[in-house]
Image: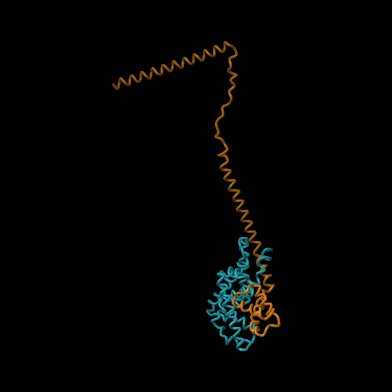
Amino acid sequence: MDYNSIKLLLNKYFDGETSLEEEHRLQQYFRQEAVHESLLPYRVLFQMLDEERQRELNPAFTRRLLEKLQATEAPRVRVVYLRTWLARAAAVLLLAAGAWWLYPKVQAPPKQPVAQAIDWSKYEPETPEKAYQMLKKALVKTSDELNHGTETVVKEVEKIQKVNEVLN
Amino acid sequence: MDYFQTHILPYQHKLYRLAYSLLRSVPEAEDVVQEVFVKVWQRRATWHEVDNMEALTVKMTKNLALDKLRSKHARTDALPEHFDRRSEGANPAELLESNDQIAHIRRLLNCLPEKHRLVVQLRDIEGMTYEEIAESLEMPMNQVKTNLFRARQYLKTYLLKTESYGLQ
């Protein structure tokens, strides 16, 4: 790279207008032995930047760091795992308890006493005479009940009349 | 662990250089890098939500290193010699005492204000784009460019002064 283009690049660099690629070209230029005399004052700057770029961590540091991180990995994962499963188990138990409490109320119909089926065949009259007797009994019973009802009404009316008499 | 080793661990040297550029202490820079990786590891359940892991780790490193630097200053109640360009070390006469040219320019860099040092570190040493630097340092892009411009101009001025003193 010729002197003039480097001089232009260097001016751009100090004005803060160079691209990364142009800055890389400047670094390359100042790494070589043959630097133009008028540019020598700047070489030390690029040499210093090169040296700083080579500063690195000791590999032992990286090894210790990874060991430290790995040591913290297992317990954390186990705790998270346990917590997750505990939470899941608690959720399942809660759902089961809720279902146990609700299910009978929703599903079971109210219990009603169920009458046994009547075998009406036992009461069927076997002959027309028996049927006549049964009907006669039923009518007599009905007549008795009606008579009893009339008597009751008469008695009640008489009581009301007596009360009316006392009041008047 | 595989994902960590292939996608996150490779940033370790870049993070170390960044921490070292602020703290200028190997054990302290290592502590910062370890703390960053442990924190990232602890948040591994959320890795899939991170758009740019490199920017995140750089940001964490910068913040932790600055916290460490400030707490160190609070404890000692004194600024280190590299802390600010306008403290000790910025005096050209002192700088010229160094026969080691690279050490000399390194000291110049260390005397820059914090923001200038950070952008030079990420651009000129790590080769990051302006967008990546802006995201990592949580700094608007125009400020990134301004800080870089000022830092380079500062270095250029001192390089030329050194040249005029006849040390190069």
Furthest toward the left, the residue is A168
Q: Locate the C terminus of chain A by quadrant.
A: top left
In this rendered view, identify the residue nearer to me: B144 or B138.
B144
Q: Residue at x 61, y 52 (%)?
A: A88
In this rendered view, identify the residue nearer to me: A19 or B99.
A19
Furthest toward the bottom, the residue is B166
| Whether residue A143 is situated above or below residue A109 in the rendered picture | above
Q: Is residue A42 left or right of residue A112?
A: right
Whether residue B130 is visible to the viewer of this picture, yes or no, is yes
Chain B shade in the render: cyan
In this rendered view, identify the residue nearer to me: B167 or B77.
B167
| Whether residue B91 is situated above or below residue A84 in the rendered picture | below
Q: Position of residue B82 (x, y in %)?
A: 58, 80
- Kindly indicate the quadrant of the structure image that contains residue B46: bottom right
Q: Position of residue A119 (x, y in %)?
A: 59, 21
The chain letter corresponding to orange is A
Q: Residue at x 61, y 72 (%)?
A: B32
Q: Residue at x 59, y 83 (%)?
A: B158
- Kindly indicate the quadrant of the structure image that contains residue B73: bottom right
Q: Position of residue B98 (x, y in %)?
A: 62, 86
Q: Position of residue B119 (x, y in %)?
A: 59, 74
